[in-house]
């Protein structure tokens, strides 16, 4: 029977995380720039404006990316989620360009892109019976900014 290790304590975990090298901030001698580095298919709750009811809560699949200059090794993946957490409950199409610009600034990148795909439901009446039901639409919107 294989023995199991006890989970690390929170303080031990913090020491381990703080001891990790910050590879992103190290120089890169390969001189290889990337057009896009980021996260794809991140599921996150958002609110969408609904003409009939004000707001509609839904879960989106979010793709976020930034350009990476040749002098860097990559992008801070945790910053993508941190940005969403800072704007929790405020993610809507009117603020998308601002969200994208903030992503670019967070990574000191020349370009950033955000795309959101989500289910959206509209109440519709059946033409013959008059019964009310929900009609599903798959929606996608996005933004990109460059320096």
Image: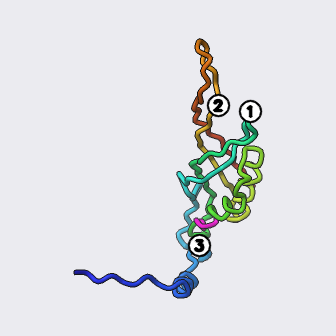
**Does 107 sit left or right of 74 as displayed?**
right
Label 1 near label 2: C-beta < 8 Å?
A: yes
Q: Residue at 58% across / 78% down in the picture? A: 22
The mark that comes first in sequence, 1 or 3, is 3
| Coordinates of residue 65 in the picture (x, y in percent) | 61, 55
Q: Residue at 68% across / 65% down in the picture? A: 107
Q: Secondary structure at mark 1?
A: loop
**Cα gap from disc 3 to disc 2, whole angstroms:** 44 Å
**Cα gap from disc 2 to disc 1, whole angstroms:** 9 Å
**Does 58 sit left or right of 92 as displayed?**
left
The answer to which image quadrant residue 25 occupies is bottom right
Where is mark 2, residue-wise? 122
The answer to which image quadrant residue 147 occupies is bottom right
Q: Which residues are magenta?
A: 75-79
Q: Residue at 70% across / 59% down in the picture? A: 103
Where is mark 1, residue-wise? 52
The mark that comes first in sequence, 2 or 1, is 1
Residue 91 located within the stretch drawn in magenta: no
* Residue 35, above or below 16: above
């Amino acid at each position: 029977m294989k023995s199991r290790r006890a989970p690390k304590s929170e303080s031990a975990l913090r020491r381990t995380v703080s001891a990790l090298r910050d590879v992103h901030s190290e120089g890169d001698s390969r001189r290889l720039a990337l057009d896009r580095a980021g996260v794809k298919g991140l599921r996150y709750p958002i609110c969408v404006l609904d003409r009939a009811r004000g707001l509609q809560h839904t879960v989106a699949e979010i793709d976020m990316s930034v350009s990476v200059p040749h002098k860097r090794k990559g992008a801070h993946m945790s910053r993508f989620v941190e940005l969403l957490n800072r704007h929790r409950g405020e993610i809507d199409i009117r603020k998308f360009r601002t969200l994208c610009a903030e992503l670019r600034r967070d990574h000191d990148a020349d370009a950033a892109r955000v795309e959101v795909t989500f289910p959206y439901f509209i109440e519709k009446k059946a033409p013959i019976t008059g019964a009310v039901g929900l009609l599903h639409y798959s929606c996608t919107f996005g933004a990109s900014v460059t320096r």
